[in-house]
Structure formats: structure tokens, C-alpha cells
């Protein structure tokens, strides 16, 4: 089977979706698929500062995967020209198919790659699989009429639609009015061979205790809330870059260390150097960083939010508070720091679960099964591209927030 996998994020872009794509593609190759990755990337100063820029580095591309890199030119202008990016993706995929035919097209993100893959499927008569990811499902479609039409089209007309959790599916259904039966739930995964606990008793604290925030430094991930809720007598390590890095630095005091960009090979050691993982996120599709923290043996504090509640249960394998509730976050941090038995129990339960349920071979087999199910089927041709461009969209002037 030959698969064309189109993504809006791949290394060196600092994103959980880069981790996801790299590991998924490696496992699909191990299952016997031939994969071509068509990767969008940023090479402008603004995009590079927020995400990390440039085409996929060879050392981050799994063996057996062919790469075609496309700069996201539409995100470098104001108003953003995603329509131009979509047209370029379609031309690229159709051209690659003409040279050596694919069996399945798969887009990571519903927009813009999902709409582009749907259009390419129409031209090539191939099935289109689309994975709805993170903010792509939280915000895209609620921002303007153009993206509402685009997302409804992607969900309604794709051969298969994958999504990371039931709570995220329900949010997307509520936003778009789509049929919940259109979605196949394929949860996230992590590499439990790389992310492992430190050699110390579960739940042990250093002196002082070290709290870790690892991921995109974005107020929607709750990093600014964490800085405000930080208990006395602890250190906070913020690992990553993002649109609110400067604001986070401005609000931090001497208890906080900013690591900036952390190469993926160094991430496991960053987790092992911490005592508690904190993710005060406002919403997720399915959080890779939570799974990495669980695999690293860390007790977790996160939020009672979409994409989190599917893997973290309050008081069983982590502690949760309401998104944006800074006092509630402080309460849960104080509770965890004060109770060694609780830390040990939460960490042990989470570690056992992530090893049993959230490994990459399990996820990849589920995706491979969808590919084989739709291969050879005829794509839906009864849809149209969005009418015009709604320039009122808040993302047209801030494409990096999409």
C-alpha cells in the first residue's frame, strides 16, 4: 500500500503533531506501507520564531519515508492566503500520484491540509482520510464562514475522519453540526521505550521540588496561569517555544527557568529531571505531553477539559482543575506537593495505563486498518470548495494562531 501523508506540522516545527507524525509514519512503514510525506513548513522569521522553521531534517524522517517539503507561503502574508497553499498542495499531490500512484491520501489537520487532500482525492479518484487535530477542531470552523464551510465539507465528504478522543469529537460535532458517526476515535500514543521514569521512588520530590511545563508556550496551554499559581518553595521549568514566550518571560520570577527549544531526543531527560508535570491547558485534541509525562513516571496536574478527560481521571491517575481557574490550579498543586502517598499512587497508575493502552504499535495498527478499509473505494464527489474568502476571520491577520 502506498500512502501520501500531508501535514501542516513536522520537524523542525515544535509541535506535538511533529512527534505524532514522526512516530506514526515509522510504524506505518513497519507495517509494510510505502509512505510519502508532503510537509508544509515555515521559513520566515516570524514563523521560525514561533514554531521553528525549515524543511524536515533527514535525521527526523523515518527510514523508508520519502519527503516533499512545501513552504507555507500563505501564512507569511496578511491577510493569510491559505487558498494559495491549498492549491499548491493539490498540485503537488496530483503530480506525485501521476508519477507513481498512491492508494490512499491522508491529511493531518482538517484545514488547510484536509481540504487540500479532499480536492486532490477528487482529481485522482483516491480515498481521503483526514485526522482532526487540536486547535484545528477547537477553533477552525467557529472563526468565519469560509472555515465553517471548509470544515463541514472535510468532515462530511472524506472517506474516513479520525479524531483523538470522544470529548474532542463531541466538541467538533457541537461546533459544526456534523454526524458523530462520521468519526473514528484513534487516541494518541507515546514511545514508552524512550520515555521512562527516573531511578528514584515514585512520587519522590527534590529539594526544592521541580514542576515542569513542556510544550507550546501559549496562553491557551495555560502557561501564564501556571506562572500566577506557582506555589512558594518550588522551581518551575518551562520547556518549549511559542507565541507567548516573551509574555511568559516577562511574568516570571527567579523561580522559573526557560529552556527554550528542546531537541526531541533530549525531551525524555527533561521529564526525568522533574518531579511533577503541570499542563493547565484550555483544550486538547489528545495530549502527547500528558502521555509522555505519564510514561516518565511523573504525577500530573491538568484540567477538566476536552482531550484531557479522556486519559486523565481526577484522583485516579492525575489531578484536574477547571481551565482558567488559577486558584483551583494552586489548590491541586498544594495538595499534590503535600501528599507523598498520593503522588506515588497517581504516578504508578498512570505509568501502568500508558504502557498498556497508549503505545505506538497499537495506534498505528488502528490507522493502518482504516487505510486498508477505504483503499479502492471511490471518494465523494458531491461537494464544493468554500464560496469566496471571509476576511473577517481572526486568523487571517494572525495565521500562527490557527
Image (spheres, rainbow, N blue to C red):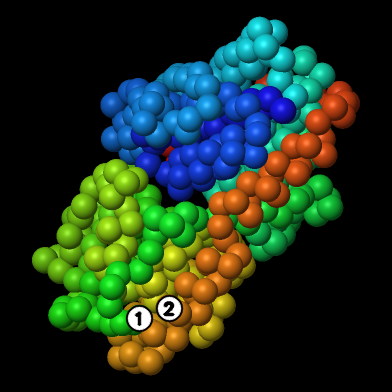
Give the left or right position of residue 155, taking residue 362 as reference.
Answer: right
Q: Nearer the viewer, residue 154 or 372?
A: 372
Q: Position of residue 380 (x, y in %)?
A: 86, 28
Q: Nearer the viewer, residue 211 or 252?
A: 211
Q: Secondary structure at mark 1?
A: loop
Q: Position of residue 198 (x, y in %)?
A: 30, 69
Quadrant where the image shows the N terminus:
top right
Residue at 28% x, 50% y is 266
State whether residue 261 is above or below residue 164. Answer: above
Q: Does any portion of residue 83 appear in the rendered image? A: no
Residue at 44% x, 31% y is 61
> What is the C-alpha distance between the residues marked 1 and 2?
6 Å
Quadrant of residue 12 in the image?
Answer: top left
Q: Does any portion of residue 182 appear in the rendered image? A: yes
State whether residue 284 is above or below residue 293. Answer: above
Q: Secondary structure at mark 2?
A: helix
Residue at 53% x, 83% y is 316
Residue designated by label 1: 202
Residue designated by label 2: 347
Q: Dot 2, how many residues are within 10 Å of its Cα: few (below 14), some (14-19), or many (20+)?
A: many
Give the left or right position of residue 362, taking residue 9 as reference.
Answer: right
Amino acid at each position: 500500500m502506498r500512502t501520501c501523508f500531508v501535514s501542516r506540522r513536522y520537524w523542525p516545527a515544535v509541535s506535538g503533531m511533529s512527534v505524532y507524525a514522526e512516530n506514526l509514519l515509522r510504524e506505518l512503514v513497519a507495517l509494510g506501507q510505502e509512505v510519502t510525506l508532503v510537509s508544509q513548513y515555515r521559513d520566515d522569521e516570524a514563523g521560525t520564531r514561533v514554531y521553528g522553521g525549515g524543511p524536515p531534517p533527514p535525521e527526523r524522517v523515518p527510514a523508508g519515508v520519502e519527503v516533499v517539503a512545501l513552504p507555507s507561503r500563505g501564512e507569511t502574508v496578511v491577510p493569510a492566503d491559505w487558498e494559495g497553499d491549498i492549491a499548491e498542495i493539490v498540485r503537488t499531490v496530483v503530480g506525485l500520484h501521476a508519477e507513481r500512484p498512491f492508494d490512499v491520501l491522508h491529511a493531518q489537520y482538517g484545514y488547510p491540509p484536509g481540504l487540500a487532500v479532499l480536492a486532490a482525492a477528487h482529481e485522482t479518484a483516491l480515498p481521503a482520510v483526514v485526522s482532526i487535530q487540536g486547535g484545528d477542531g477547537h477553533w477552525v470552523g467557529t472563526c468565519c464562514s469560509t472555515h465553517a464551510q471548509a470544515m463541514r465539507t472535510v468532515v462530511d465528504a472524506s472517506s474516513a475522519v479520525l479524531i483523538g478522543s470522544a470529548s474532542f469529537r463531541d466538541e467538533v460535532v457541537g461546533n459544526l453540526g456534523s454526524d458523530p458517526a462520521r468519526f473514528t476515535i484513534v487516541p494518541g500514543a507515546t514511545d514508552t521505550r524512550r520515555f521512562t521514569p527516573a531511578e528514584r521512588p515514585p512520587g519522590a520530590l527534590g529539594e526544592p521540588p521541580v514542576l515542569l511545563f513542556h510544550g507550546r508556550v501559549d496562553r491557551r496551554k495555560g502557561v501564564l496561569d501556571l506562572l500566577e499559581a506557582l506555589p512558594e518553595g518550588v522551581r518551575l521549568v518551562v520547556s518549549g517555544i511559542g507565541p507567548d514566550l516573551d509574555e511568559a518571560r516577562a511574568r516570571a520570577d527567579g523561580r522559573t527557568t526557560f529552556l527554550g527549544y528542546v531537541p526531541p531526543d533530549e525531551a525524555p531527560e527533561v521529564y526525568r529531571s522533574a518531579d511533577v508535570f503541570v499542563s493547565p491547558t484550555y483544550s486538547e485534541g489528545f495530549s502527547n505531553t500528558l502521555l509522555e509525562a505519564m510514561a516518565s513516571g511523573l504525577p500530573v496536574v491538568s484540567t477538566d477539559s476536552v482531550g484531557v478527560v479522556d486519559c486523565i481521571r481526577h484522583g485516579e491517575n492525575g489531578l484536574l482543575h477547571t481551565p482558567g481557574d488559577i486558584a483551583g490550579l494552586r489548590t491541586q498543586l498544594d495538595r499534590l506537593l503535600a501528599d507523598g502517598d498520593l503522588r506515588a499512587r497517581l504516578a504508578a497508575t498512570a505509568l501502568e495505563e500508558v504502557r498498556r493502552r497508549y503505545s505506538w504499535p497499537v495506534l498505528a495498527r488502528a490507522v493502518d486498518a482504516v487505510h486498508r478499509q477505504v483503499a479502492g473505494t471511490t471518494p465523494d464527489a458531491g461537494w464544493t470548495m468554500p464560496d469566496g474568502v471571509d476576511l473577517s476571520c481572526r486568523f487571517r491577520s494572525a495565521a500562527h494562531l490557527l
